[in-house]
Image (spheres, rainbow, N blue to C red):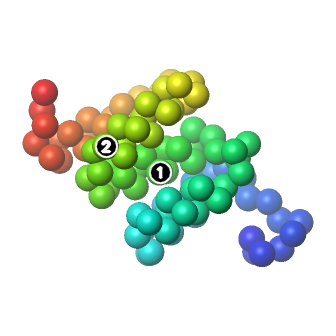
Amino acid sequence: MTDRPNFALSPSEIAHRLDMVHRVHGIKLAEEYFNSVPNDAKTCQVYGALLSAYVQQKSVEEAEAIMQKMRVMGFATSSFPYNMLITLYSQIGEND
């Protein structure tokens, strides 16, 4: 469906697709997909999906970088991204 020129995905659908790409093909293809998304479609949901992928991979530096970008862009207004980082720190044993 995405190959059709008149079919545009919503940010929510992009976030779900990013999550599926990560689960099926890994983080590298998920990053490539994220980078191919137009900037105006990169909402807090899309950034959140990438953050979630980094947390699942236990990629601390990448997760922190995305979180910082979310803060700068004003996307870190809900508890979701903070909870994701707390989950990551808990998984790696960094309780401070």
Residue on which disc 2 sits: 61
Residue 31 picture location, percent across and down: 50, 59
Image quarter of the C terminus: top left
How packed mark 2 is, by other alpha carbons closer than 10 Å (few <14, some 14-19, many 20 or more), is few
Query: Horizontal placement of 73 versus 4: left or right?
Result: left
Kind of residue sitting beneath label 2: Glu
Image point 28% across, 45% down: which residue?
60
SS under mark 2: helix
Which is more toward the observer, 39 or 7?
A: 39
Q: Work out whether 88 lies above or below 4.
A: above
SS under mark 1: helix
Kind of residue sitting beneath label 1: Leu
Image point 65% across, 59% down: which residue?
36
How packed mark 1 is, by other alpha carbons closer than 10 Å (few <14, some 14-19, many 20 or more), is many
Q: CA distance from mark 2 to mark 1?
A: 13 Å
Residue 69 picture location, percent across and down: 50, 33
Which is more toward the observer, 64 or 79?
A: 64
Q: Are marks 2 and 1 in contact (CB under 8 Å)?
A: no
Query: Horizontal placement of 6 versus 69: left or right?
Result: right
Residue on which disc 1 sits: 50
